Amino acid sequence: MPRQVLPTTEALHAMLEMLLGEEIAVAPAEPVSLRAPRGTHLAVYVDDDDAAVALALADPALSAYAGAALTRVPPATAGESLESGELPENLLENLRETMNVLSRLLMNDDTPHLRLAQVAPSQATLPAQAALLPRLVQRADFQISIDDYGGGTLTLLTL
């Protein structure tokens, strides 16, 4: 039996639209490779014992656009980030906040509490989480588009 839950498309849409204050489109996406390209960011969620219980991968485009949209950073800044392959600290901090709020969608009254532990480039964190990957039993991939910014893919994996 899964320990955490995955959000519905509708719940993810409502949360992102409320948080980002932009028109958002969310649709199921084909599963993407977990061999994340450079610029992908990984959020690690832990339980009260600090054991990893869920992961979220935001591809480079979603990392930049969601990071920019949260505080209305101009879309051109997100585009520059994509070109350089580096997420500026302000966009990374905004992405962290977005991923922190997303944690609410991975729980309900019947699941254990979890919290965001870290958000970092996947190249730095995914190897450390490799032991967790075979234990993850639930997966959802979403295509997300943020008006005036752009879109990308979010992958959620939980126990």
Image: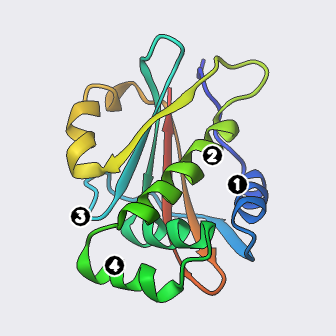
From the image, tell me which residue sits under label 1.
12
Identified by mark 1, the residue type is: Leu
Measured Cα–Cα span from mark 3 to mark 1: 25 Å
Give percent across and percent down for residue 12. 70, 54
Circles 1, 2 touching at the beta carbon (< 8 Å): yes
Identified by mark 2, the residue type is: Leu
Indicate the secondary structure of the residue bearing disc 1: helix
Give percent across and percent down for residue 156. 51, 45
Q: Nearer the viewer, mark 4 or mark 1?
A: 4
Q: Which mark is residue 102?
A: 2
Q: Which mark is residue 100?
A: none
Indicate the secondary structure of the residue bearing disc 3: loop
Residue at image point 28% right, 57% down: 36
Measured Cα–Cα span from mark 2 to mark 4: 23 Å
Describe residue 7's horizontal placement relative to residue 157 as left or right.
right
Against 45, residue 102 (above or below) is below
